[in-house]
Amino acid sequence: MQEIQKYTLQALLKSSAECFGDKTALSFIDIQGYTYRDLYVKARELSFFLHCSGIEKGDKVAVFSENNPNWGLAYFSIAWMGAVNVPILPDFTEIEVKNILEHSETKAIFVSKKLMARCNLETFQDKFLIIVLDDFSLPFDTEHQTIERFLRERLEEALHFEPLQVEDDDLAAIIYTSGTTGKSKGVMLSNKNLIFDVIQSLTLVNINSEDRFLSILPLSHTYECSLGLILPVMQGSTVYYLDKPPSASYLLPAIQKVKPTAMLTVPLIMEKIYKSQILPKFTGNKVTKMIYSVPLLRKLLNRLVGMKLYKIFGGCIRFYGIGGAPLSPEVERFLHEARFPYAIGYGLTETSPMIAGCSPAETKLYSTGYVMKDVEVKIDNPNPETGEGEILVRGHNVMKGYFKDKLLTLNAFTHDGWFRTGDLGVFDKDRYLFIKGRLKNMILGPSGENIYPEEIEAIINKIEGVVESVVYEKKGRLIAKVHVNYDELEESYNNLKQSAINWQNQMQSKISDMMVEIQEKVNKQVSKFSRLSLVVEQVEPFEKTPTQKIKRYLYID
């Protein structure tokens, strides 16, 4: 790990340029990207332009774009001059973008051509500076038109531009979360929050200048930005970006080209691979289904599939990080038995984001690993029988607070400075942390029992034909909304398609039977107080956050 003089993004960028010079830092696949020296020089030039445009230290500058090398360049240019990054998720709506720009008091925005229409920029052109991220053109500047042209005219000044010194505690970013509770919040992260979290993450997993990252998650999310951009830049790794959405037909050939050694993902990606490509091969007929049900034979088959999966991911992967949402226990068991180099991490935007994790070699089933060095975690008000309680965190990775919301910030901390995660967890004897669910989601049973919807949902989601589910309480009854695999059902009733009415009736009858079957299967596997009273069909897929957590608040009656 390289030594940096200060815990700032400014110091990190300078140090990486000195250490790794001509090595590629950020790049598209098949296109020459930015070297570390390029990143440093161009970030300084962009900073000079921002300075000349009236942007000062502490001002807010938004970045609204899909992943690409210019995203990282813009991010470091903002950080270099001590301005504050405001990353905006690409799938935010026009109203959400407008609210963020206004609430954050943004003075400039880097926006991709593809997303310009969602900004309604004409209404903002008199309010702040607008830069097109794809080519750094200036759509409303008739004199210069591009930053490159501006710099040619003032090259000598740009070369000698020295920004104000950035300090560890200076604000580096405001991250607006979509959350699962409906209201976006502006999480304030300092330079030290981010750099400290990255350094501590490296005590869990060794990343170096030989590593190749393939970036597929939104950079505007702290998970990818901290661990998929800042961390590899600190270590001199190369990060590759896709120039199209990561569909299977495009992603798999890209993986073979890059042969990544490290990837950061959300559970949905591996869950889709397992449910659509792996599981059907073992449950397609009675013989293979019976063989797969025998633990010893299942482990052997999973190991064989694991070797193939390793090759599909390029044959060089040594760290496949999973975070952002809970991973299906069934899929994790497969990965564990397949000896695939996965590791699960735990954290929140408010903690920059990492709190706990481990290397693939140290992974323990259904755990998020152990707490990072120099970060404190304790379980608040633990259940005397189970040891479960709310996870509280204290350390240099914990946010400064919520932007312009003192009351929300006050409520997020205990009186003695511990951050309330809102997550329920428990430690085992080896100090591995296990997440039980969200405190707000927990349901209190009729006799005071703690019921965790996530645990019931995990059982439902294992049932054949189920895609996903949400469990909630209504008038003392547990209800499950279930979204099924309609394509699979249609295929099984394909022979009835000549009679459309017959087919539709049969389909609906099958779905009704499935709902009853799900209720019976679940109730046989859970305690009396966790039994479902009703299972209903959820026709449309559940709406999700960028990290693929279901927005539960939309589906609880």
Image: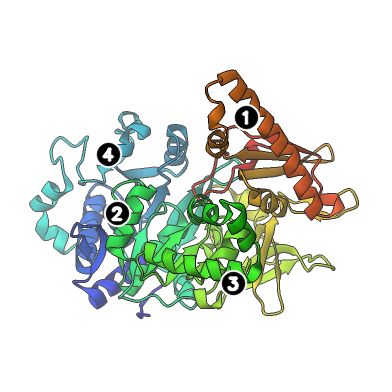
Disc 1: which residue: 507
Alpha carbon separation for disc pair 1 and 3: 43 Å
Residue at image location 56% in from the left, 62% down from the top: 347
Alpha carbon separation for disc pair 4 and 2: 15 Å
Query: Is 256 on the left or on the right of 89, as rendered?
Result: left
Q: Are discs 1 and 3 less than 8 Å apart at CB?
A: no
Q: Are discs 3 and 2 less than 8 Å apart at CB?
A: no
Q: Badge 2: few (under 14), some or many (20 or more) residues near its Cα, within 10 Å?
A: many
Q: Earlier in the sequence, mark 3 or mark 4?
A: 4
Q: Secondary structure at mark 2?
A: helix
Disc 4: which residue: 113
Disc 2: which residue: 74
Q: Earlier in the sequence, mark 4 or mark 2?
A: 2
Q: Amino acid at mark 4?
A: Lys
Alpha carbon separation for disc pair 3 and 4: 41 Å
Q: Position of residue 326 (x, y in %)?
A: 60, 57
- On residue 142, the disc is none
Q: Badge 4: few (under 14), some or many (20 or more) residues near its Cα, within 10 Å?
A: some
Q: Earlier in the sequence, mark 1 or mark 3?
A: 3
Q: Earlier in the sequence, mark 1 or mark 4?
A: 4
Q: Are discs 3 and 4 less than 8 Å apart at CB?
A: no
Q: Amino acid at mark 2?
A: Ala
- On residue 369, the disc is 3
Q: Position of residue 272 (x, y in %)?
A: 50, 51
| Nearest to the observer: residue 545 or residue 355 | 545
Q: Nearer the viewer, mark 1 or mark 3?
A: 1
Query: Is 118 on the left or on the right of 145, as rendered?
Result: right
Q: Is residue 368 visible?
A: no
Alpha carbon separation for disc pair 1 and 4: 44 Å
Determine whether 30 is above or below 111 in the image.
below
Q: Nearer the viewer, mark 1 or mark 4?
A: 1
Residue at image location 33% in from the left, 60% down from the top: 255
